[in-house]
Image (tube, coloured by chain):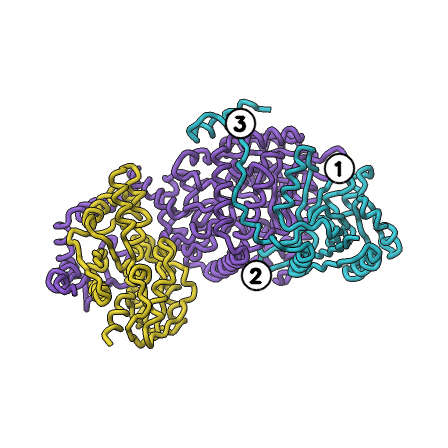
Chain colours: A yellow, B purple, C cyan
Amino acid sequence: MKVSLFITCLADVFYPKVGMNVVEVLRSYGVEVDFPQDQTCCGQPAFNSGYHKEARESARQLIKAFADSPMVVTPSGSCASMIRHYYPDLFKDEPEWKEKAIELADKTYEFSEFLVHVLKVEDIEAKFPAHATYHHSCHMSRGLGLKGEPIKLLGQVEDLEMEDLPYCNDCCGFGGTFAAKMSDISEKMVDEKIKNIESTGADVLIGSDMGCLMNIGGRLRRLGKEVRMMHVAEVLAEGGQK
Amino acid sequence: MSAHPLIFNERVDKALADPILKKALPLTQDRLRGGRINAAEQLGNVEEWRELASQIRSHTIANLDSYLEELVTNVRKNGGHVHFAATSDDAVEIITGIVKEKNAKSVVKSKSMVSEEVHINKHLEDMGIKVVESDLGEYIIQLANETPSHLIAPAIHKTREQVREMFSKVAGRQLSDETTELTAFAREKLRQEFLQADIGISGCNFAVAESGSVVLVSNEGNARLTTTVPKVHIAMMGMERIVPTWNELDMVVSMLTRSATGQKISVYVTGINSPRQSEDSDGPEEFHLVILDNGRSNILGTAYQEALNCIRCGACLNVCPVYRHIGGHAYGGVYSGPIGAVLTPLLGGYEEWLELPYASSLCGACSEACPVKIPLHDLLIEHRKDEVEMGLTPFSEKMAFKGFSFATSHPSVYETAVKLAHSGMGFLAKDGVISKGPGMLGGWTDVRDLPQPAKQSFREWWKKEGKGRNQ
Amino acid sequence: MDLKKQEDFLNHIASKLGRPRKSGVKPPIWESQPYLHLYEGKSHEEMIEDFIANLGQLNTKVDRISRHQFAASLGNVIQDFEVRSAVYWDDATLHALQLSDVLEKNQIDAFRWDPKENEEEMKQRTANVDLGIVYADLGLAETGTVVLFNGGGRGRLVSLLPPKFLCILSERDIVPRLTQAVQKVHDRVSEGLPACINFITGPSRTGDIEMDLAFGVHGPGKVHIILLRDE
């Protein structure tokens, strides 16, 4: 089985370890991973801010970069959602590109989704002793309808104690440029999210979207609090080194 | 929509600093969210209900001219009067005209957001007419000289102590802050108003085209009193608040009550089908239906048309994390929360309401909660797209995204940017963390730390090590 | 009647919708019936039980009785609700139950809603009595709702002004839910509807003060139902 990795701009620049872990985990299941160098960004920042013409340029590049990939896996619920949910409509006035967009959308998977639904992983061989809770990002749970998949994977990790996060359906306040543009409101939202995380007593916050984790982690740090942020792939990779 | 004394950022700051809101908003949201979720679980197949409700509303809006024509024909056939108000001024002219003609001195009102849109209370009071709001929440804010802060529960921003003070002033004696005593006072006081009022003004939850009916959904009973006791009844109706027949009423009422508070049905659903008939000795002698456009027609035939499907349940307000922290007044208009952010710029223009579509993290909770499946968060993106295309966004932002577009469509440029990210932002970083950034970054760093870009990006790692190791 | 304003208004809508004016549109047959599973397979007895249970959750007692028990049942209501005065509908079933006799025997100062009487006086009297008594045409099992077709001797104010409300209805008139009730209204449109149809579910309530529930704000705060068995 061959997949291409879509690393996402955030992971590429800020969290390359997540990408390394994704590659490691996929390879451990016998998947051949490649990385089309021409990939850049899915264009979501521009799209969400209303710059759709600009977003289309990013999208075109991404479609081109993965044109020959049989499958695309990405460690980001929001980027996968952008491609699956919004790419086809972005090209609604360009039938040729719309078709290509649909092609890409049909073969793009979020990381946990890929493990559960394509690789059909039933038994993770990983051990990661920690007291943790999971953050469902809005784009992944609502945009893609993926909620149980990461929970299922984490549930199989030995010694990993998972707590339910109260008010898990409430946004963490990232929203891309929203966090910077409406920082006052975003601050209140992330503080409430942190209050809920703290109420679980967890030492680790696991998620599938580095944007959210960057937001929550950045605020935790500013407040001088100690909770470790981890992507699902990091937990599986670190835990796999038994 | 009128000019607000404070600008958007000021309104938000004021709201975020308000200790009463800080308690009241989560309390209200949690209560009402829980209601809706329980109701949905009881239904078991809520997605089917949403789909049907959405179809009914979309069909109705797509044929609005036909159904309105049918409605007014039937209202007239049943002895009622119909008035078309293209603008807010028209509505005011019509209603003040009726009031003058009837030589009315006092008006009692039940809840109507449309009446807030045209500020009818102020216009009537300027004429020297006594206007009394009878919905308890609306009565409270009328005494406070404020506007509603929530679609369903207008006075959530008021504490019981505040209510006690206002009621005590009116009562001329000190009341306790027990809910039962306060409510009993309101019942007694407002009962007098009902019995004396010359004219009752109501809203219209749903008009039924096939019978010329106005249906009101309420819990207190004030809507019934308003539309039964006074000799003249004026119903103010947003032109989109209509269903074809009584059969469709089932779905929209069922979804409205479940989505608003979690009730399977409200205490009172009242069908007003005509003025009093020859054998009756109660009910109004005269009925006037005022149908208001006020910018709604500008939404027809646009990407925003689905926004007219709204049944005003408030479910989107109850799940919105932004509303949770800023409340209704910060939005500045009559409608708040996600539907307010979508509708207000459409009815009032971008000039005055530029920021509203950006007061959202696009989490999508609103679209998920909407009983008629309005894609609210996508419509907010649509607004942002329109603002960009109309040149209303800041120049620096435009340039930033032009740069973004260039870099992301030219891989070599992008790669260079990624390579330089670590060192380029090095001067801002201390121990791998950036705590103060320039420009737009400042918005981020005001609230949280930013990690310094990694020394070795993923793609560099891949080139050096990662690529070689497929099994 | 300003026909031009109407035509401009409606023409404007059509033009914004990008097509010529439409008239006489009827809704399609909606294939989806998401409510069916809520009552499919339920016996009438089960529906009656639902009706009673739903009202129980709204502080409203339902007495399920045979007609010959009516006087006793009404006597209980009078005691429970501390009734000294009442107004009631001019309704055939209420007459058949000899309502006015029972009220008189209980020394209740009662009067019948009569459109021939002075309207203002009747309104004032109704506002000042303890209890309003009506007979409902339909009951909705799913919610505990009673449906009143007002008109003539069935005054609207009877179920509205007094602080307490007694509704009598027959078991056989209980239908599953709103769906059936609106169908019945729809079927009656051609013959003309009364000025007002009420769907009433329990006592008047509000949560407008700090989300704290209170009863009897404007409408009756105490409601009681007498359900007549099929005989």
Q: CA distance from mark 3 to mark 1?
A: 33 Å
Crowding around mark 2 (Cα neighbors within 10 Å: few <14, some 14 to 19, many 20+) is: few
| Element assignment for label 1 | loop
Q: Quadrant of residue B393?
A: top left
Q: Looking at the picture, which amino acid does disc 1 mark? A: Asp
Task: Pinpoint residue A142: horizontal percent, then vertical percent.
Answer: 38, 55
**Chain letter of the residue carrying label 2:** B
Query: Mark 3 or mark 2, which is nearer to you?
Result: 3
Marked residue chain, label 3: C
- Establish whether labels 2 and 1 are both on one chain: yes
Question: Mark 2, mark 1: which one is toward the viewer?
Answer: 1
**Residue at 73% over, 56% down:** C224
Specify the amino acid type for callout 2.
Answer: Glu
Q: Which residue is label 1 attached to?
A: B280
Q: Position of residue B59 (x, y in %)?
A: 49, 37
Residue B277 higher or lower than B405, as above or below: above
Dot 1: few (<14), some (14–19), or many (≥20) neighbours within 10 Å? many
Report the Cα–Cα distance between label 3 and label 2: 54 Å
Instruction: For the N terminus of chain C, give its image quadrant.
Output: top right
Does the image show residue C149? yes
**Residue picked out by circle 3:** C23
The amino acid at mark 3 is Ser
Query: Farthest top residue?
Result: C4
Q: Residue at x 33, y 60 (%)?
A: A117
Let me know if marks 3 and 2 both belong to one chain. Answer: no
Q: Is residue B151 above or below residue A156?
A: above
Q: Secondary structure at mark 2?
A: helix
- Disc 2 designates what residue? B161
